[in-house]
Image (cartoon, rainbow, N blue to C red):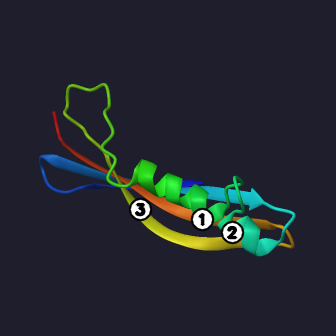
């Protein structure tokens, strides 16, 4: 799932924001709490979300461009998406913001 918003911020600059939703899913036969928190060596949704946060938090992306465009990632909301007997699914929103000058 992805959305974007583009706007011209004046005669010389553009601003573009893309929104992506990532899903973390874990299953554990020990029940929903173990699916959320993990058990032993098994990762739970909270562990997966922590890994995603560490990966995307403040990430500056490099694009092959002469325009000097450097998108930055910002984290949005984390929400439960689905809870079942032994499965937990959470969603995490990531915003990618970039701006550049007209060439």
Residue drawn 81% across the image and 62% down it:
28
Residue carrying label 2 = 36
**Figure quadrant of residue 102:** top left
Q: Which x, y percent locates residue 42?
A: 72, 54
Q: Quadrant of the N terminus?
A: bottom right
Count residues near mark 3 (Cα–Cα under 10 Å), then give few for <14, some for 14-19, many for 20+. Answer: some
Count residues near mark 2 (Cα–Cα under 10 Å), then give few for <14, some for 14-19, many for 20+. Answer: many
Residue drawn 53% across the image and 70% down it:
78
Q: Which x, y percent locates residue 60?
A: 30, 44
Residue carrying label 3 = 75
**Figure quadrant of residue 71:** top left
Name the N-terminal-most of marks 3 and 1: 1
How far is mark 1 from mark 2, CA to CA? 6 Å
Residue at far front of view: 40
Instruction: Tell me if label 2 and label 3 are in contact, CB under 8 Å.
Output: no
Name the N-terminal-most of marks 2 and 3: 2
Instruction: Tell me if label 3 and label 1 are in contact, CB under 8 Å.
Output: no
Nearer to the camera, 2 or 46: 46
Residue drawn 46% across the image and 57% down it:
53
Provide the secondary structure element on which disc 1 rests.
Answer: helix
Instruction: Tell me if label 1 and label 2 are in contact, CB under 8 Å.
Output: yes
Provide the secondary structure element on which disc 2 rests.
Answer: helix
Residue carrying label 1 = 46
Name the N-terminal-most of marks 1 and 2: 2
Q: Nearer the viewer, mark 2 or mark 3?
A: 2
Residue 37 in sight in this render = yes
């Amino acid at each position: 799932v992805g959305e974007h918003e583009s706007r011209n911020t004046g005669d010389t600059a553009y601003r573009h924001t893309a929104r992506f939703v990532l899903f973390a899913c874990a299953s554990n036969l020990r029940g929903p709490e173990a699916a959320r928190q993990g058990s032993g060596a098994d990762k739970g949704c909270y562990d997966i979300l922590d890994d995603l946060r560490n990966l995307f938090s403040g990430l500056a992306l490099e694009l092959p461009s002469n325009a000097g465009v450097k998108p930055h990632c910002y984290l949005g909301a984390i929400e439960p998406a689905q809870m079942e007997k032994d499965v937990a699914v959470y969603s995490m929103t990531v915003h990618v913001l970039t701006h550049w000058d007209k060439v």
